[in-house]
Image (cartoon, rainbow, N blue to C red):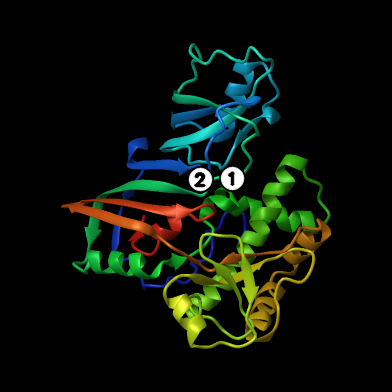
Amino acid sequence: MPSSNSFLPDWCRAYGASLIHGQIKQTPQDFQVVENLGFVLTGDGEHDYLWIEKTGANTTWVARMLAQHAGIAQRDVGYAGLKDRHAVTRQWFSVRRPSSKGTDWRNVQIDGVRIIETQRHQRKLKRGAHTGNRFRITLREVRSDGTDVPHRLAAIRAGGIPNYFGPQRFGRGANNLLAAANLAAGKRLRRDKRGIVLSAARSFLFNEILSVRVGDGSWNKALPGDTLNLDGSGSVFRIDVNDDVIDQRVAAMDVHTTGAMWGDGAVHGDGAPAILEQTVAGRFPEYVQCLRAARMKPARRALRAVVRELEWEIDGTVICLEFGLDRGSYATAVLRELVGL
C-alpha cells in the first residue's frame, strides 16, 4: 500500500515508456476543458442552468458561491462533474430557484467565474449526468529523444488508452489511500470524507487490475469469462466463450473489456478474469474490507477509454493536443502514454 508520502505505483503503459518530457499547466489556459452535457434543456422548470467559464477556481467552491448569491443551501446547486482547478473550464451548474421570481444572475461577481448563458430546466443537474469532456492541452518546454511522436499519437487515436483513474483520485501524497487503510482499522471519518476515501480505495484496486491486464496484453482483448461494456453506455454483458464476432467488435472498439469496481458482493464472474481480479484484490485486504463494510455496490468499468477525435499540433518545443473523453475518463491517462511531466 502506498504511504502518505510515497508516489503511486507506476502502472503499466500500453505503448511503452514516455517519448517526451515537458511542462503542463504553466498557465490555466494550457489546460482547457469543455463539458458536453449530452441532453437538451427544457427551457422551463424550477432550476436555473448556468453555463459557466471558470479560471483557477474549484468546482465545489463555485457551487458554494452560487448558493450564497441565490440564498439557498449548497445542496441545491448541482453539477455533473468536478473540473480541474488549475485550468480554464466550461461546465453547467444548476441552481434551484428560491421562488417563482428566481435569481438575478446579471450582477453576480465571483472571482475567476464568468456566466456565459442561462437557461431553465425541470430537474437538478446530477453527478455523472454529462456524456463527456473535450480537452485542449498545451505541453511546453518539450524535450524529445527524436522518436516519432505523431506515430505514438496515431496509435493512441486508433487503439485508445488504458482507462486508469488519475492521480487526483487518490489525494495529495496518496493520502486518501492511507485514510482507507485507517478506516479498515476502525478509525472514524467525517461523512463527506468517507465517500472520497472509499472511492479512492476501489479506484486503486481497479488500476491494479488494469495494470496486470496491460502487462499481459489482455486489456484490449476479450477472454472467456470477461464482462464486456458497450461503448458509450453503461450496458454490460458477460461472455462464457470468445469467438470471431466478439474479437471483431473489440477490435472496432464497439465493446470493451471491463474490470471490477470492488464492493460488497460478486463482481467478477467466472474463469481466468475472475481469478486475476480475486488475486489482485487479495493483495489489499484492507481496501476490500472497508468497501465491504461500507456496503458499496459493486460495478464494472471499461478497461479501455476511446480518445475521441484526437488532433495535435507540434511547433518546436510546444505540443497542443485536442481530444474528447467519455465521462469518468481522465486526461492524465492519455498524457502518461506520451509524456513524462
Can I make out residue 1 in this image?
A: no
Q: Identify the residue position indicated by label 2 in the image.
A: 38
Dividing the image into 4 quarters, which one contains the C terminus? bottom left
| SS class, disc 1 | loop
Between marks 1 and 2, how big is the CA–CA gap? 8 Å
Q: Are marks 1 and 2 in contact (CB under 8 Å)?
A: yes
Can I make out residue 162 in this image?
A: yes
Q: Amino acid at mark 1?
A: Ala
Disc with the residue nearer the chain's start (1 vs 2): 2
Q: Amino acid at mark 2?
A: Gly
- Foreground pick, 124 / 25: 124
15 on left or right of 273: left
Q: Tell me if residue 192 comes above or below residue 278 in the rendering.
A: above
| SS class, disc 2 | loop
Q: Tell me if residue 175 comes above or below residue 65 in the rendering.
A: below
Task: Point out which mark residue 129 bears.
Answer: 1
Number of marks drawn: 2
Q: Residue at x 48, y 31 (%)?
A: 57
Eye-nearest disc, 1 or 2: 2
- Foreground pick, 282 / 161: 161
Q: Position of residue 240 (x, y in %)?
A: 65, 85
Q: Residue at x 22, y 52 (%)?
A: 313
